[in-house]
Image (cartoon, rainbow, N blue to C red):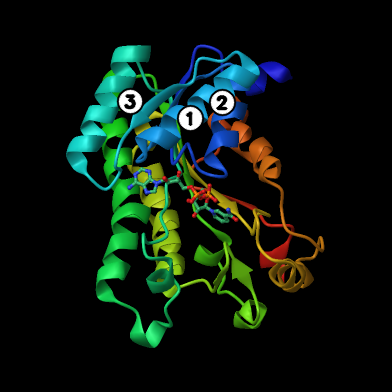
Amino acid sequence: MSELFDLAGKVAVVTGGAGILGRGFCQVLAAHGARVALVDVSEASAREAAETLNAADGTDIFPVVCDVSDPHSVKSMVEAVVKRFGRIDILHNNAATKSRDLLAFFEPFETYSADVWREIMSVNIDGMFLVAQAVGKQMLAQGSGGSMIQTASIYGVVAPDQRIYEGSQYMGVAINTPAVYSASKAAVIGLAKYLATYWASHNIRVNVLTPGGIESGQNDVFRQRYSNRVPLGRMGRDNELHGALIFLASDASSYVTGQNVIVDGGMSCW
Ligand SMILES: NC(=O)c1ccc[n+]([C@@H]2O[C@H](COP(=O)([O-])OP(=O)(O)OC[C@H]3O[C@@H](n4cnc5c(N)ncnc54)[C@H](O)[C@@H]3O)[C@@H](O)[C@H]2O)c1
């Protein structure tokens, strides 16, 4: 059975690999035998994340700096990964951004800046397009299929319950889920479905991993209000996404494409 989930001999690229969830994604892919490129826009974070993971687990995770919203940077990233590992079999298209200006990111819809909207879209969906395009070309050239996983969000599937944000904070800032985040994540799901049929004849499978809210430093008010909306009664832990990721990345999901695996404690079922 464990062979089904074995990634030995495979090369995986994880964008946003230095983020809260990305580090664990790189770690679990490497633990299942993949050679992993940890891709992030921040050189310092990418290097630090790879060094920390490699020191802990004796892995050889390869940090690559890349701005996924920049086609030239994406092309160089793919070249660097292929130069290092020779091929790419798994793409975890996972990077997303909050604006550099957190207050502008959480601005109410009525006064939301078009510039901030475009800034978010340029990473959350344009970035996924550019990386899928560049890695897809590489997979096509290799001729042996591949697996792409794109991280969406529960708020690309259902709308947020606005009542949970009263008194809620994250990193000391009053929070909400801006419309641009929902819109970008819904687009991620549409792109994955499109590519699933587009590349099906080449056995490049494309699926979505949709996390619900994962605990990562939100305040107690938010945690409690969010948890009240979840059938399992709590927020998720980052490692609770790992089983679904390995399933989608490996041959265990060889007949699964164009699907959205929702890991949300049941939140979207009522
Ligand atoms: N954490 C959650 O609760 C949660 C819930 C639902 C969905 N998600 C999704 O999961 C994914 C990972 O989330 P996270 O919590 O680790 O976020 P995070 O902000 O911690 O990590 C995102 C990473 O992407 C990188 N990044 C930003 N812009 C980039 C660019 N232009 N090019 C390359 N890299 C860039 C950042 O530097 C960061 O390391 C995201 O797609 C997010 O939307 C997260």
Which residue is tagged 1?
Answer: 48
In terms of image quadrants, where is residue 121? bottom left
Outermost left residue: 72
In terms of image quadrants, where is residue 131? top left
Residue 186 located left or right of residue 41 = right
For disc 2, the neighbor class at 10 Å (few under 14, some 14 to 19, many from 20) is some
Whether the residue carrying mark 2 lies under 8 Å from ligand 1 is answered with no
Q: Which residue is rendered at x = 49% and y = 44% of the image?
A: 207
For disc 1, the neighbor class at 10 Å (few under 14, some 14 to 19, many from 20) is some
Residue 139: mark in rendering: 3
C-alpha separation, residue under disc 3 versus residue under disc 2: 29 Å
Name which of mark 3 and mark 2 comes first in the sequence: 2
What x and y, as percent, mark residue 138? 28, 25
Q: Which residue is rendered at x = 63% and y = 58% of the image?
A: 212
The amino acid type, in three-letter code, at marker 3 is Met
Is residue 248 among what the camera can see? no
Q: Are marks 2 and 1 in contact (CB under 8 Å)?
A: yes
Q: Which residue is rendered at x = 73% and y = 61% of the image?
A: 266
Which residue is tagged 2?
Answer: 52
Q: Is residue 172 above or below residue 46?
A: below
What x and y, as percent, mark residue 59? 56, 15
